[in-house]
Amino acid sequence: MNFKKVRLILFLLLSIPSYQVFSQEAKQKQKYVMVIHGGAGTILKSQMTPEKEKAYKAALALALETGFRRIKAGESSINAVEAAVRIMEDSPLFNAGKGAVFTNEGKNELDAAIMDGNTLMAGSVAGVTTIRNPVSAARAVMEKSEHVMMVGKGAEKFAGQAGLEIVDPKYFWTKDRWESLQKVKRQDSIKAMEGAGEKKSLKLGTENRDSKFGTVGAVALDKQGNLAAATSTGGMTNKKYGRVGDAPLIGIGTYANKLVGISCTGWGEFFIRNVVAHDVAALMEYKNKTVEEASSEVVMKKVPALGGDGGLIALDRDGNVAMPFNTAGMYRGTVTSDGKIEVFIYKE
Ligand code: ASP
């Protein structure tokens, strides 16, 4: 072997460890610690003004920053998801808290859930009309009651006793959502006239619904390696009084265990029938699928196979993220352990 070759081999051998260190560092940096969504649906660039797009991106970034600060300070993933979801509940841009959609009766009935992947403790509320931040009520149910789910007036009474802020139902009213309800109702009555006498199909209402969802959700991984997930929503425009969607149902719209955390958005009835969030976790646990494979199997195949649409966010214990959706867009964003924030709206 000549001297040149020896030098080359030596150089290569010496550079392997540093390369490994570098690639490990790069991997560490890419590890995601939080992922959020602000709803999936017919979100088209052609229908968006630059101002609106800017406002959505800023709200998503603020939610990510708020959750990330908690993680960085060593707080639990439960604290992080609650904090991020509260920001989006307080923003009129999203269909959760202020800015929630209206029921057929013209009310705002809110659903929310939260789950701790480490302990499998969970809490949720449904059909509440006076709790400013339903995600915090879900957390109170999880931590301060012996129950998992509370609905309506009982949940409101409990939230008040737990010291949460109670507001007049008018607080949730926004002009945009009110106009959406009027539009959907107009379409509904035209449809009803056209279809009078016809056999009611399961799909009745498909064209009449407001095709923008806007539920919010967050999944976080804390420094202790624990996952948590939370979801909050006003449900679907023109929903019948008392209807409960997938968001507050543990294992469907919201789920977390030691392996993965998931929060969903979409046409709730189809998510319920597909038991979406737990199905993703089960595909990972029992079939060894990656978070990406499991999420896309459910969102891109199983949900549309029944006729449903929507998306989800999922984060696994190694910091891998999946954000599949079968709609035109989904408000979403991520933050990595080094604080890098990214937000997206359309298909990239
Ligand atoms: N999944 C929600 C529901 O059906 C709606 C949404 O995601 O916006 O209640």
Image (cartoon, rainbow, N blue to C red):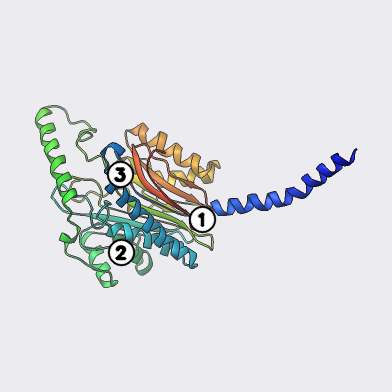
- Estimate the x, y position of residue 282 in percent, counting from the top left: 48, 45
Q: CA distance from mark 2 to mark 1?
A: 23 Å
Q: Which residue is mark 3?
A: 268
Labels 3 and 1: the sequence-earlier one: 1
- Estimate the x, y position of residue 318 in percent, counting from the top left: 55, 52
Q: Which mark is residue 258?
A: 1
Q: Residue at x 71, y 52 (%)?
A: 18
In the image shown, does 35 or 56 lie closer to the viewer? 56
Is label 2 in contact with label 1 (beta carbons under 8 Å)?
A: no
What amino acid type should be assigned to the residue bearing mark 2? Ala
- The image quadrant where one finds the N terminus is top right
What amino acid type should be assigned to the residue bearing mark 3? Gly
Q: Residue at x 25, y 69 (%)?
A: 165
Above or below 176: residue 70:
below
Q: Which residue is mark 2?
A: 137
What amino acid type should be assigned to the residue bearing mark 1? Lys
Q: Secondary structure at mark 2?
A: helix
Some atom of ligand 1 lies within 8 Å of the CB belonging to the residue at label 3: yes
